[in-house]
Amino acid sequence: MAVQSQTPSKTSARSPYFYHVEPPPAGEQTADGRVERFLNAFAAILRFSNYRFLMDLYARASAKCGRCAVSCQVYQATQDPQDVPCYRTNLLLDVYWRYFTNAGQWRGRLLGDSSLSEQKIDEMAQAFYRCTACRRCTLECPLGIDHGLVAHLGRYILSEAGIAPKGLVISVREQLEGKTGNTSAIPLPALLDNLEFLQDELEELKGVSVSFPVDQEGAEYIFFPAVSDYLMEADTLMGNAAVLQAAGVSWTIGSQYFDGINYGLFYNDWVLERIIQKLITEAHRLKVQKILIGECGHAARSARQFVPAFAGERSLPVVSILELTWQAVKDGRIHLDPTIVSERVTYHDPCNIARSGWIVEQPRQLLRSFVRDFVEMRPHGRENYCCGGGGGLVSLDETHDFRMQVSGRTKAEQIRASGAQIVATPCANCKKQLRELMDYYQLPVQIVGVHDLVLRAIQL
Amino acid sequence: MPTWMLIAKGAALRFTLGICALGLLRLLLLTALDMFAALRRAGDRRLPLGQIARQTLSWVAPLARLHRSRPAYSFASFVFHLGILFAGFFLVNHLDILKDLLGISWPSLPKPALDALTLAAIIGGAYLLLYRLYAASSRRLSKLSDYLLLVVILNILLSGYIAGRPWNSIPYDSLMLFHTLNGIALLLVMPFTKIAHCVLYPLIRLGSEIAWHFPPRGGEQVIHALYGPEGRKI
């Protein structure tokens, strides 16, 4: 049976958008000031970033052929012209052209047309979050326009104008300004207890003592998983630790900062850079040589792409646990029993490390090395479909209907068509979204991390 | 000498070509300089140049990709561009005018081949226009200028094609005047409309990549500009 969908309501009673937004502090902001705030934020961002030339280039060259529409899983589900990536991009380009180019300003004076209104801001606030930032549309744009980057910029401007998803803001507030310093608000003592528990579990499972080292100065790697893994993905973490121990890698977890998540990638460059600086600071405190990112697509991409950008001379190499594990298998440092995993397994590519990154073949080769029945979804790799929860949407519970009925529908259909019993995916966000999708569409498929399977097969 | 020839061989076309060439050159140079400045500001200046070049070149002759997304539309767009490029740059009549005006020329292509390409471009262009008019997703994207530019280009192709047909009953000079005036209009607006993608195309993918290379402390500077030195809480 093919999965069916409906377009959920685009608004909710609690917010003008399909996600919740924190109300502005009393006296600080009124609805009437939003246009001015938006334009001020846009102007400041253009001044201090590298977006201005891009806006100019896109505004001049965009042919608006609409070819991107077909590649977008949101448009595939809704067939709504407003979900065409190019349409969304042009919402912002129109504002740029009207207010930040001479031609647009003259046209505005002569014809009296004003591009920006409260309604248009609302339209952008809706549109830029209906995009899952998967950047699949960039594959089909003949000109090379990156609609995902424009959605990123649109979200950045909106956030400085006071419109950002509450779920992301609250997590980041705890990570950067809260007591615990991580998005899941895990206190350090709880983390340490958790590590002890994982160590005991692993010993019980494999009969070997595997350590989770904390604050080991001078280790080769400092390890940053998605911090939510400590709460929800025990098998993934045990798989990570088992590989690191078996491969003889020296590694550590930092007690002062241990969260790989970087929601700044989803909505705000200021936040993005501050989180990167926290990674770097902790890495240097412990005098490590490299940063190791766990199974998390956006964490790996944001660290790999932005540590060199923001850390300057303090930059350190960033490695994904998937690269490290596959290298260890190739080197013969770890051994995976090919008789253990007999179910049919497929692999879901997290967009941030496949299409926008460098991890495509490594996990496939790794899985093929010990999984007896490995199948691919179609399409896959760099052309994969987003799980439907990308761009931070999966962290916003109120977007559930949209993620199930619209943005995740194509992925559910792909998984069903693959006939797989297990989907392995190295991303905390993808796993959460895919589990919800399997429940929603009642598909009897288990969603696991790649290292969950490695844990089953590894010989210690 | 008919009016169209006076225009085509006179100051009007020379002026128009000058505006077009200088305008496009200015665009190209300013864009390249802006990109260079952006890269200098970036914290990480490494670029996957080979990959970008391969992707850019792969869309110059995208035959292997046309079937993947909106195949009919994509094929129509491809032959439309092909016809414009070949008829525009390799028709002997155009090259004669160019030689008169600027003293430069290059080998032309046989007229029958160019006629076939022009006809394909007309059919392709008409399909693009109808698609833009009738497909909701394209209509929603389109502004008046998107239709007008297509119409002007179709005017040029159609009048040029019909003028050379033995069955044509419209006076040749009238058609050529129409052809020339539309051609001049197109040349004049090229640097100021989306047709500028004809020269900006090689820079767009590179620009998209450079824009992902953020300058360090850019976000902090934005916060200071908006909220003063104390910044804001999250």
Image (tube, rainbow, N blue to C red):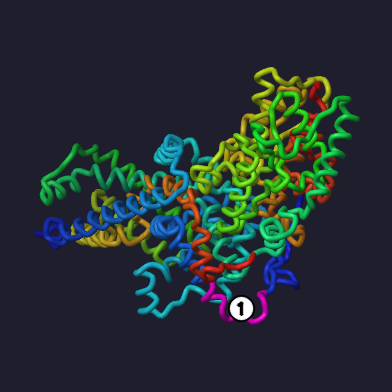
Q: Indicate yes or no whether the magenta region holds residue A129.
A: no
List the single residue furthest toward the right: A204
Viewer-closest of A315 and A357:
A315
Q: Amino acid at mark 1?
A: Gln
Q: Which residues are magenta?
A: A24-38
B116 relative position to B55: left or right: left
Task: Pinpoint residue A156: horizontal percent, then vertical percent.
Answer: 56, 61
Secondary element under disc 1, as helix, strand or loop, is loop
- Residue drawn 54% across the image and 74% down it: A37
- Residue drawn 15% across the image and 62% down it: B12
| Residue behind mark 1 | A29
Task: Pinpoint residue B100: horizontal percent, then vertical percent.
Answer: 10, 49
Task: Pinpoint residue B122: horizontal percent, then vertical percent.
Answer: 37, 51
Quarter of the image where the C terminus of chain B is located? bottom right
B172 relative position to B228: left or right: left
Residue A119, picture quadrant: bottom right
